Image (cartoon, coloured by chain):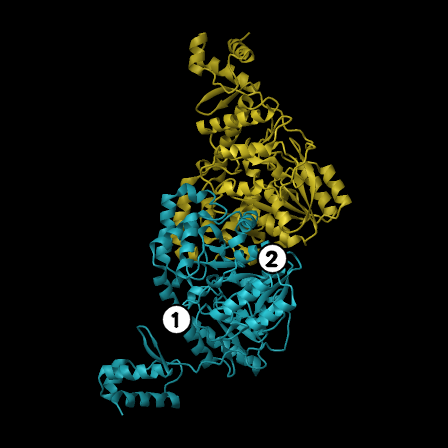
Chain colours: A yellow, B cyan
């Protein structure tokens, strides 16, 4: 047996016996080497071996940690228990009220903390735009958006293998406006729209506000959109549009594979259903392997793609876009007669930022931070929450999706947490039919700290109290 | 006869004979005094006399000018000829395309030129907000809007005699979003909504996009909303909401008097019709006598008031508001699920600007400039356009409304002007039923210059060619 294998075996034993517990830090390389009379290189080799085995995780500039026994993913089938669904749920108003409170720990918010954003570069770009274009800042931008920004977005699509012209980009106030405008443009009241289940409650709200009917296709943990079921639903129903989040679906974090993406585009085209793609999380693949947007596989022009800078660069600048294809004129019109256009200054600054800075470099840092945050959340949940709690294992995005053990109630936990100043998103909001009453969504957009550790502990206690 | 009367009489004669023509500058006070062997004070007195008679107008730092024989206002009754109305008119797409072109003289745009805005103060406020709150700039603002800005807006209402709480203010991307959200919140598809005729085409578009039915109540030149007719229409129809522009209606520029305002509120309350007030031009009373918002007279809570900073401070920052009363929660929700919230930086900066600067002082300067621009437009029209052209005589706002003589076609003139690089708004867009085919709206938001003079001359020639 090699020396490093002997050390690895010793550590493996300590982990198995519980002498080193989930989330605990291994002794430093220096300590391991000194303690076992080995070279530092050998100690490193031992740790790398344990990392390959999935027993420990490395954290930059911190060391190796015992990996938590990751909770199993939530069940694919929604539970049978039903409560009032997303649209008329009173929790919705509480969620909105919460967004205005600075005294609530924002574990509800699927956005990156400002600490993870390229603050200096973005504020410098804002400041320069202000100095160089004061008149343009105060005047309207064109309703479709600034050409310079639209060119940058088209360039980004080209990097992802999708041919998008700047002429079909419409700048919006985030992807939410894109989805809302697309629905308003495509669908008449009473039309049927397909969404995933679970899916972001904002999509359900936008659909309900337009008096559209909802059909739900399952999004399966670890697999993504159930394309066979989608095809069946489209065969049985006349569906005007499908609003889909194929990359790191919110809240599950699942990715729909490339073959499934092509199949779903084909199915929708066959049945005359226009696809509205929401790809706001695609850039946040923690491994760095960005899943492709649907747009890459679109050969039929049957697709409206919505994107946003809110999840990767800044929620507060309120900038997103639509790659609108044949619907460009109609969408510019819809945009003009609801919000006229996006503010000029953020557009000027974002165009400059994208031109002058290496977006990929920022994304690499952000992805690492999010992966680390998620890992800490997983550990805290396995340490502090009731046994039987299940958690999604996404490989990207900004959320974890939790399912409480039998008898747990996500909405009651949400209420109890809010009283303690902790924000969460109750699962019931992510279904139009009141499914996911035992689920909860947590953000992994905040860097880990003692306050978060405390909050996760408190949440675990509150959850345990429900089951007692 | 006093000396000054003799001089006044001489000048009067020159004007009557055409020796001094409309729009021409009178000799300077110094020249008049020297030329007639009089004191400067006497020359001033003569000019003041002519000004009182309405024969000349004073322009600050420039002198006295012969007043144009102002064209009579457009006829109250819409012409009988009908063409496709606002919503499906192909001119609409051309108007939108025009907004993206920097090579078109923006006489179509009812916004103040950046030259008339407090550029230094606003950019300084933006720059300071950026320096002092970089994290807040990048992060979401609350969906309802920043409390500091909402307080400033409530304070402004208080100055206008209206009691509005900051808690019922919802920040929007301009008044257009306010109106669109209010309609979405109040009305179901198929509901009937009352609007003025003529009215801003954006209102007609927003109503049509929501599949609402339109009923039109006349807005009369010089009088405003025909309240008797409004009451009749509400009696005969079940009307869900009325979108009204009582102050400096766009495009006519008329003001509905305070008594009529109270009567229309009472009538709407009696018939269960919610009033949506669009008061974006109220601050632009050229005389400085700001007409009161409807909100001042509201005693029944039957009103949603929309306002904006786009017409007085900056269109490009995209900030407006709703004083939403009982509909506050519903409107915050509608806002959140369409655009989430307004961008943070413009809100921070606008709140600071309003706190630190004297808005009234800026408004005084802006109003004078607009009044002057309108006067120049009037003069140019009476000098260069075909006899029989009629023009509105607003006392505030940002537009003139023109009616061509018998045989004139506003839409053809719009097309011909666009080919010459001159933007105008064809009258037909301001009616849902295709009225006002012989009308045109021009902006008075641009400071007068040689290019404008040339454009007005060219427009006059194009109009004359139609009649030949």
Give the quadrant of residue A67. Answer: top right
Tell whether A192 sits left or right of B66: right
Check disc 1: other Cα within 10 Å, few if <14, some if 14-19, many if 20+.
Answer: few
x then y, percent, for residue A359: 49, 40
Locate the C terminus of chain A by quadrant: top right
Q: Chain of mark 1?
A: B
Tell whether A132 sits left or right of A251: left
Circle on res. A329: 2
- Element marked by disc 2: helix
Label 1, on which residue?
B287
**Relative vertical location of residue A233 with respect to residue A23 in this rendering, above or below:** below
The residue located at (44%, 16%) in the rendering is: A28
Instruction: Give the farthest residue toward the bottom.
Output: B1
Query: How far apart are the two marked residues, 2 and 1, measured between alpha carbons?
Result: 41 Å
x then y, percent, for residue B451: 43, 71
Number of numbered discs on residues: 2
x then y, percent, for residue B22: 40, 82
Closer to the camera in the image, A332 or A38: A332
x then y, percent, for residue A137: 43, 55
Tell whether B42 sits left or right of A259: left
């Amino acid at each position: 047996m090699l020396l490093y294998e002997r050390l690895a075996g010793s550590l493996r034993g300590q982990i198995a016996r519980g002498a080193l517990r989930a989330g605990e830090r291994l002794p430093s390389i220096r300590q391991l080497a000194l303690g076992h009379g080995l070279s530092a290189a050998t100690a490193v080799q031992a740790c790398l071996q344990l990392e390959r085995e999935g027993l420990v995780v490395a954290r930059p500039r911190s060391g190796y940690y015992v990996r938590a026994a990751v909770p199993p993913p939530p069940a694919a089938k929604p539970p049978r228990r039903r409560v009032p669904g997303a649209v008329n749920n009173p929790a919705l108003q509480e969620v909105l009220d919460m967004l205005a409170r600075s005294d609530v720990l924002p574990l509800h918010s699927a956005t990156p903390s400002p600490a993870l954003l390229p603050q200096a570069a973005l504020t410098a770009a804002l400041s320069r735009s202000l100095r160089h274009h004061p008149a343009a800042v105060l005047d309207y931008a064109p309703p479709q958006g600034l050409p310079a920004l639209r060119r940058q977005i088209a360039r980004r699509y080209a990097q992802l293998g999708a041919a998008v012209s700047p002429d079909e980009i419409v700048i919006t106030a985030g992807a939410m406006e894109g989805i809302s405008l697309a629905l308003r443009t495509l669908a008449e009241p009473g039309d049927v729209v397909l969404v995933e289940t679970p899916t972001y409650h904002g999509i359900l709200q936008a659909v309900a506000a337009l008096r559209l009917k909802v059909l739900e296709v399952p999004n399966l943990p670890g697999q993504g959109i159930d394309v066979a079921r989608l095809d069946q639903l489209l065969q049985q129903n006349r569906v005007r549009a499908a609003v889909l989040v194929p990359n790191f679906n919110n809240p599950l974090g699942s990715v729909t594979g490339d073959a499934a993406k092509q199949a779903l585009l084909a199915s929708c085209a066959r049945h005359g259903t226009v696809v509205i793609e929401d790809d706001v999380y695609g850039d946040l693949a923690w491994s760095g392997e960005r899943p492709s947007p649907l747009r890459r596989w679109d050969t039929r022009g049957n697709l409206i793609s919505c994107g946003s800078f809110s999840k990767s660069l800044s929620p507060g600048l309120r900038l997103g876009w639509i790659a609108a294809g044949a619907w460009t004129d109609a969408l510019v019109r819809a945009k003009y007669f609801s919000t006229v256009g996006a503010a000029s200054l953020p557009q000027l600054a974002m165009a400059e930022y994208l031109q002058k800075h290496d977006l990929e470099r920022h994304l690499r840092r952000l992805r690492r931070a999010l992966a680390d945050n998620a890992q800490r959340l997983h550990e805290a949940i396995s340490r502090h929450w009731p046994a039987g709690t299940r958690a999604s294992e996404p490989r990207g995005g900004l959320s974890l999706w939790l399912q409480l053990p039998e008898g747990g109630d996500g909405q009651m936990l949400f209420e109890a947490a809010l009283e303690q100043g902790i924000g969460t998103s109750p699962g019931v909001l992510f279904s139009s039919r009141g499914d996911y009453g035992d689920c909860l969504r947590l953000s992994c957009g905040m860097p880990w700290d003692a306050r978060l550790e405390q909050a996760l502990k408190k949440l675990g206690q509150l959850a345990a109290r429900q089951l007692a």
